[in-house]
Amino acid sequence: MTSIVLFGPPGAGKGTQATRITQSTGLPQVSTGDMLRAAVKHGTTTGIAAKEFMDAGKLVPDSIIIDLIRDRVKQPDAVNGLMFDGFPRTIPQAEALSQITDVSHVIAIEVPDSKIVERICGRYSCSVCGAVFHDKFNPTTSQGICNECGSSELKRRADDNEATVTQRLDAYHQQTSPLAEWYDGQGIFHRIDGDREIDEITKDILLALQ
Ligand code: ADP
Ligand code: ADP
Ligand code: ZN
């Protein structure tokens, strides 16, 4: 089992790029953020424990995240590896991952903090297929209708507001960005300029994965 990690601050474009490259890599996309939001929606024990951290823009404790991933890798589609989006976010999470799967590439999507608030506050997504859009940078072609599946159920995340974003960026700088050095030392870390057109970024990621 050999996996790929998409790494970067909130709003860097990890989810957007993951959806575009999953066909080329053949690896299923695993977003811990999406898994946690599903758990909150269904009122599971994990969801109840995670909600207060997510609402405050803080990282959910490592033990909860690592349990989620241990369960996910047991599923049959994980046999050749997974493409992680938003995981790992701390060194203990990365250490746990290294016990579970080899990691061939860590793709770091770099976007300056000054661009992050606008990216996150303009984000919306399709409740049916998960496609991600942006009011200004990547709007749906017809207003209120998902480009991918035609649904009119478009929604915004509760934590995509300016106050929470500031907290999420702090968590990124304090707890997540030290992972860059940790992975760089292993020779699998690829930096990609994420402050460009979505298509250009996709091309560079696919090149880095060759
Ligand atoms: P992440 O998964 O890293 O939090 P998303 O993929 O959800 O990020 O992207 C955050 C927001 O920024 C979304 O509204 C998305 O449409 C938009 N976005 C993604 N990539 C770009 C880009 N290269 N330029 C401008 N906006 C982008
Ligand atoms: P973003 O668009 O900010 O990258 P995600 O959807 O990945 O957001 O995560 C949303 C929230 O879920 C985070 O602010 C955090 O509370 C929690 N979360 C997601 N993944 C992790 C993780 N690997 N470790 C700890 N908390 C996480
Ligand atoms: Zn859709």
Image: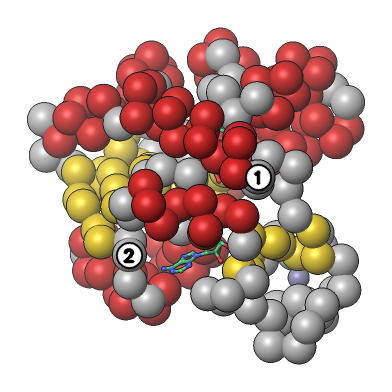
Of circles 1 and 2, the one toward us is 1
Total number of numbered discs in the rendering: 2
Q: Splitting the image into 4 quarters, where does residue 76 fall?
A: top right
What is the x, y in percent for residue 162?
A: 60, 44
Q: Which mark is residue 179?
A: none
Q: Secondary structure at mark 2?
A: loop
Q: Nearer the viewer, residue 110 or 208?
A: 110
Would you say residue 74 is visible in this rendering?
no
- Disc 1 residue type (three-letter): Asn
Q: In the figure, 130 relative to 43: above or below?
A: below
- Tell me if the residue at label 2 has its CB under 8 Å from ligand 1: yes
Q: Which residue is labeled 1 in the image?
A: 161
Q: Earlier in the sequence, mark 1 or mark 2?
A: 1
User: Which residue matches tag 2?
Assistant: 195
Residue 148 percent location from the top left of the image: 70, 78
What residue is shown at x 81% (from left), y 18% (from top)?
Answer: 48
Q: Is residue 91 left or right of residue 35?
A: left
For the point 41% across and 57% down, the residue is 115
- Quadrant in which ligand 2 is drawn: top right
Mark 2 surroundings within 10 Å by alpha-carbon count, few (fewer than 14), some (14 through 19), many (20 or more): some
Neighbours of disc 1 within 10 Å: few (<14), some (14-19), many (20+): some
